[in-house]
Image (spheres, helix red, strand yellow):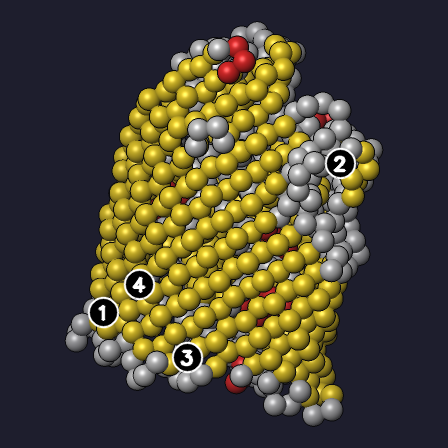
């Protein structure tokens, strides 16, 4: 899209009377006859607030809405809300909001969009295939969340809350699903009070599906590429001995077997689902998570909260890394990760002109590469065509310690000032050995880097009246730097710097037609520095290294969404228009010839050293748009509701080099999901027929190391739910 078109479209969008960035949460089951929108709340800033009166750009969905819109995991979020892209390249993903997040699949590079489950930050970038089930709400916040989410939220943050036990009585649901590709899914939950103060909730999700892929040349010797077998279970225990004290303990287990990750080479004439391989394949995640949330409210309304998290995971991958049945390029990788975290909050009462939150956070993250479990077979480098087996073993410990707080003060009933800040100290260590056993070569690394950083937010909010809220703020975000791993050529590894984002933002949230329509329009301008990329090393081009883009990347845009409920008609709309531009930067594309000098600031320009300045930021589409509409028909004493959701994501670039011949361009995609729901009058049963990607658009979901990963094809089926 040309610059003139972007400006014209922005002007048109600015005339649209406010588009809300909050997606309306669905009513509770007993409110199924509601014909207006209910209040939407967010909890990401550690207290419960009305989203229409909170200075953040966010999308909020209930678990029911996620299912109805075809959102079943992190990857499919991009088709339900603006400014979001998620590229799934196997067990790692590139999750970006407004073009900021993570673009390189390396455990050395942190994420810029962090995901929380039940108040605990989960494994960054990896172990992201956990299915959505028994969800209470999902909050996605756009823009840097440096005060509350910390260093891994330069692009935004996702807060997922699974349903909690309650003391109201025995209740729950069971859902059975069958669809194309023999897709079987059984999901359910039961809530059981164990007395007046204790309640237990058990939930589970079991899923099986045949592969989307067909092997047209060669055959995998182990595994069945693309076949899905998932088991996920959750046990939650609530103890509430008094009105003041509430203790919640949740435990999750997931075994996710996706059968490996078939790919096709960039430029291949084959269908994305016709693969050539000399195998074998494997793709398994196994994780456990335990979260202890203790909440105590003092007599004066002040709240003390403790959130403790423990997570342990193992990911195991075997892949044919060149996507052919001839070349012996393979990988066999097993990695363990353990994550401890602890957060304390002290939250003031909601009443009065002065409100505040203070907190402390600590996280200990350990990635382990066990001996003999990380092997890749490949050419040593593009300029050294020696086929070798490379191994890696060791540990990558990381820690983060932070103190944070936010103060809100009402100058008048209409004018509010908010100031928040977070001080973080992070450490990254590498204790690893990389080797080529056949050549007797190895190199060890024992390095450590430390960083201190202050981030935060200053917002000025004005409540014009009960239906109009205006805000403007400046916020900062930071993603820690790290260490390059040991290199077999003997070049000493060096550190790379952290990323910084400065965000200027303003918005208007409005409510009209007696609560039947909510709208918001918001604009942002981001200055993005030290973008972390993998390129040919400037001083030793025969190797690749994680480097920083010098100078400033500018990303700015407009976001607008709206939701409405007019009796039987419901709808939601989301729109994002964005422009991004890299600063001057000379770099060597690691997929080409790694020769010649290449100073990042001065070049000189050559066949291998190119200036990428002026190129678009990676994973930053100029246009995203989503629209969903449903209508309730009274049928046979019940309700029949057809629903259609449409999503458009314009073309994006996967690397800063923007080289279409190497597969850097992801074409625009248009995805349509459909749902037909019938609910009898008593509401105990829900019958649904669903379809995702109903026009069967074949599209490249992600590109990594010259390989194309396919987006899911059309799927359809039936779903039956029994509530009790």
Which label's residue is closer to the chain start, 2 or 4?
2
- Residue wearing tag 4: 293
Q: Which disc is residue 296 wearing?
A: 1
> Distance between the Cα atoms at labels 3 and 2?
49 Å
Residue mark closest to the camera, 2 vs 4: 2
Q: Is residue 454 visible?
A: no
> Distance between the Cα atoms at labels 4 and 3?
19 Å
x, y percent for residue 231: 55, 58
Residue projecting furthest to the top = 596
Which label's residue is closer to the chain start, 1 or 2?
2
Residue projecting furthest to the bottom = 637
- Residue wearing tag 3: 192
- Residue wearing tag 2: 219
**Marks 4 and 1: CB-CB under 8 Å?**
no
Which label's residue is closer to the chain start, 3 or 1?
3
> Taking 100 as reference, is 712 above or below it?
below
């Amino acid at each position: 899209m040309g610059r003139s078109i972007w400006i014209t479209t922005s002007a048109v969008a600015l005339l649209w009377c406010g588009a809300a960035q909050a997606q309306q949460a669905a009513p509770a089951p007993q409110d199924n006859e509601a014909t207006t929108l209910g209040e939407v709340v967010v909890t990401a800033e550690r207290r419960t607030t009305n989203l229409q009166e909170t200075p953040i750009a966010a999308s909020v969905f209930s678990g029911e809405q996620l299912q109805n819109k075809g959102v079943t995991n992190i990857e499919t979020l991009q088709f339900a809300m603006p400014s979001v892209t998620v590229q799934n390249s196997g067990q790692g993903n590139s999750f970006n909001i407004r073009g900021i997040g993570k673009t390189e699949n390396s455990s050395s590079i942190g994420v810029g969009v962090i995901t929380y489950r039940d108040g605990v930050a989960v494994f960054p970038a990896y172990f992201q295939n956990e299915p959505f089930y028994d969800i209470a709400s999902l909050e996605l916040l756009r823009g840097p969340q440096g005060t509350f989410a910390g260093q891994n939220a330069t692009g935004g943050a996702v807060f997922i809350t699974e349903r909690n036990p309650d003391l109201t009585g025995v209740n729950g649901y069971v859902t059975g699903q069958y669809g194309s590709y023999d897709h079987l899914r059984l999901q359910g939950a039961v809530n059981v009070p164990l007395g007046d103060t204790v309640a237990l909730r058990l939930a589970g999700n079991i899923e099986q599906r045949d592969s989307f892929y067909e092997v047209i040349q060669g055959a995998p010797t182990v595994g069945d590429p693309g076949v899905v077998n998932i088991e996920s279970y959750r046990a939650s225990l609530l103890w509430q001995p008094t009105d003041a004290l509430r203790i919640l303990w949740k435990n999750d287990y997931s075994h996710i077997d996706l059968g490996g990750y078939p790919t096709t080479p960039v430029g291949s004439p084959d269908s994305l689902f016709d693969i050539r391989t000399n195998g074998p394949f494997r793709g398994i995640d196994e994780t456990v998570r335990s979260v202890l949330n203790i909440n105590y409210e003092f007599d004066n309304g002040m709240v003390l909260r403790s959130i403790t998290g423990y997570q342990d995971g193992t990911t195991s991958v075997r892949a044919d890394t060149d996507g052919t049945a001839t070349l012996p390029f393979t990988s066999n990788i097993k990695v363990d990760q353990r994550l401890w975290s602890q957060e304390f909050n002290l939250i003031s009462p909601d009443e009065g002109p002065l409100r505040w939150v203070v907190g402390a956070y600590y996280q200990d993250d350990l990635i382990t590469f066990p001996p003999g479990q990380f092997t890749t077979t490949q050419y040593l480098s593009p300029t050294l065509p020696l086929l070798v087996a490379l191994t890696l073993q060791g540990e990558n410990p990381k820690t983060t310690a932070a103190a944070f707080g936010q103060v809100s003060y009402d100058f008048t009933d209409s004018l509010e000032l908010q100031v928040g800040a977070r001080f973080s100290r992070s450490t990254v260590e590498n204790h690893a050995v990389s080797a080529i056993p056949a050549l007797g070569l190895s190199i060890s690394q024992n390095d450590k880097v430390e960083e201190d950083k202050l981030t935060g937010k200053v917002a000025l909010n004005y409540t014009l009246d009960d239906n109009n809220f205006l805000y403007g703020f400046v916020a900062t975000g930071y993603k820690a730097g790290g260490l390059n791993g040991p290199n077999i050529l003997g070049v000493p590894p060096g550190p790379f710097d952290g990323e910084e984002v400065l965000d200027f933002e303003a918005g208007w949230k409005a409510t009209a037609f007696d609560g039947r329509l909510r709208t918001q329009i918001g604009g942002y301008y981001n200055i993005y520095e030290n973008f972390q990329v993998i390129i040919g090393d400037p001083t030793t081009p025969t190797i690749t290294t994680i480097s920083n883009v010098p100078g400033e990347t500018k990303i700015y845009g407009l976001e607008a969404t709206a939701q409405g409920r007019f009796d039987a008609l419901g709808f939601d709309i989301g729109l994002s228009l964005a422009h991004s531009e890299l600063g001057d930067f000379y770099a060597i594309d690691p997929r080409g010839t790694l020769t010649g000098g290449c100073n990042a600031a001065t070049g000189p320009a050559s066949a291998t050293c190119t200036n990428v300045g002026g190129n678009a930021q990676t994973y930053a589409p100029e246009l995203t748009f989503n629209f969903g509409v449903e209508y309730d028909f009274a049928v046979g004493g019940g309700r029949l509701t057809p629903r259609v959701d449409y999503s458009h994501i314009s073309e994006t670039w996967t690397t800063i080099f923007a080289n279409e011949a190497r597969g850097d361009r992801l074409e625009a995609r248009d995805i349509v999901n459909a749902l037909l729901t019938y609910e009898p009058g008593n509401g105990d049963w829900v019958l649904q027929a669903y379809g995702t990607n109903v026009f069967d658009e074949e599209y490249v979901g992600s590109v990594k190391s010259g390989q194309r990963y396919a987006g899911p094809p059309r799927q359809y089926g039936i779903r039956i739910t029994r509530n009790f």
